[in-house]
Amino acid sequence: MPRRPGLSARLKLTLSYAGFLAVAGALLLTVVWAYLLRYVPDNPQGLLGVSPNRWLLVRTFAPAAATAMGVLLVFGLVGGWLLAGRMLAPLTRITAAAREAGDGSLSHRIRMEGRQDEFRELADAFDTMLEQLESHVAEQQRFAANASHELRTPLAISQTLLDVARKDPSRDPGEVFARLQAVNTRAIGLTEALLTLSRSDRGNFTRDSVDLSLVAEEAAETLLPLAERRGVALDVTGAPNRTSGSAELLLRMATNLVQNAIVHNLPAGGTVTVHSAAQGDASLLRVENTGHPLPPELVPTLTEPFQRGTERARTDEHAGVGLGLALVHSIVRAHDGTLDLAPRPAGGLLVTVRLPGEPSPRV
């Protein structure tokens, strides 16, 4: 909102310096004046008419004191103006950087030189904020572009199916409806994943006490039919261990991990191991699966949105949208936890989620 113009910080500091110097000078002159008058007799004639007296002292000292006060005031104003300008120079650089950031340029950095002081700390904190903001904006732009591309694909397929059905009335409607339903299901899944990702990124959820072992069991039970269809052995172990967070988001995290482990397993005869445990003051969830060997350089990219580990994930009935591990990473981060991905030497992936633990309630 607009404000009335006021004095600049430099002028305020200048006036403060000058005022302080003037007051200090006035106090000093007052002390000197009182000290001198104490030892000067109040006799206008004095001894033989030439001895110092108060009247003579006043006539001699007053003009000199007034001149000294004027010099002090001028010196305070000039010196204060120069000193304030030098002291506030770092703020000028920070203000210029803030204006550039406000205009949309996030690549500018202050990089203030010199020793560590309050202004240097402020400039370094501002540079750190700009780096994080630039990274976040770039990530959001990349995510928006990928999301637009992913959402455009099912819509384009639906449009193509409808055009083909309209031009070929003899085509089996059941086949068209089935393919439309599959495409629509994929689009709905992508939309729900995007909403969940946005919600976990904002961190606006209610925290409750959640038993991570029960969450793992529920996720495995839900996906057991999928594992049986693929011939994958699903083994769930663990002891009660509690953490604080959203039961819904933590269940989505565990479900994504188990489903990802099943889908990216060997064609048949593979295994998926889910284990939860308390370790010190942390709650752990480990999901390990057999599968194809993963290049070490590929593993760090798996948590990026719309990244897929293998091309096979695109072709089967559980194609996914490339948000599984991205959602897991976002949910873990929102719960102040850590996510570790490590390729197994024999093939497959070991995923370890570490969340802040919570003492189990006493019975």
Image (cartoon, rainbow, N blue to C red):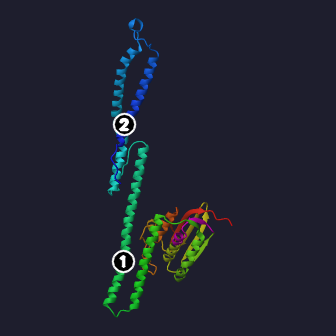
Determine whether the residue tagged by mark 2 lies in a helix, strand or loop. helix
Q: Nearer the viewer, residue 158 or 237?
A: 158
Q: Position of residue 235 (x, y in %)?
A: 59, 75
| Label 1 environment density (alpha carbons within 10 Å; few <14, some 14–19, many ≥20) | few
The residue that label 1 is drawn on is 153
Q: Residue at x 38, y 74 (%)?
A: 150
Q: Earlier in the sequence, mark 1 or mark 2?
A: 2
Q: Residue at x 52, y 83 (%)?
A: 229
Q: Is residue 6 above or below residue 185?
A: above
Q: Position of residue 173 (x, y in %)?
A: 38, 91
Q: Is residue 170 above or below residue 120?
A: below
> Of the residues shown, which amino acid type is indicated by label 1?
Thr
Residue ranking furthest to the top: 48
Quadrant of residue 27 within the rendered picture: top left
Quadrant (top left/top right/bottom left/bottom right) for the N terminus? bottom left
Q: Position of residue 103 (x, y in %)?
A: 32, 56
Disc tally is 2
Q: Residue at x 34, y 43 (%)?
A: 8
Q: Nearer the viewer, residue 271 or 170?
A: 170
Q: Position of residue 13 (x, y in %)?
A: 38, 39
Quadrant (top left/top right/bottom left/bottom right) for the C terminus? bottom right
> Of the residues shown, which amino acid type is indicated by label 2?
Leu
| Front label number (1 vs 2) | 2
188 magenta-colored? no
In this orientation, does residue 61 appear? yes
Q: Which mark is residue 70?
A: none
| Label 2 environment density (alpha carbons within 10 Å; few <14, some 14–19, many ≥20) | some
Q: Nearer the viewer, residue 362 or 28?
A: 28
Q: Residue at x 42, y 84 (%)?
A: 181
The residue that label 2 is drawn on is 15
Determine whether the residue tagged by mark 1 lies in a helix, strand or loop. helix
Q: Which residues are magenta?
A: 240-252
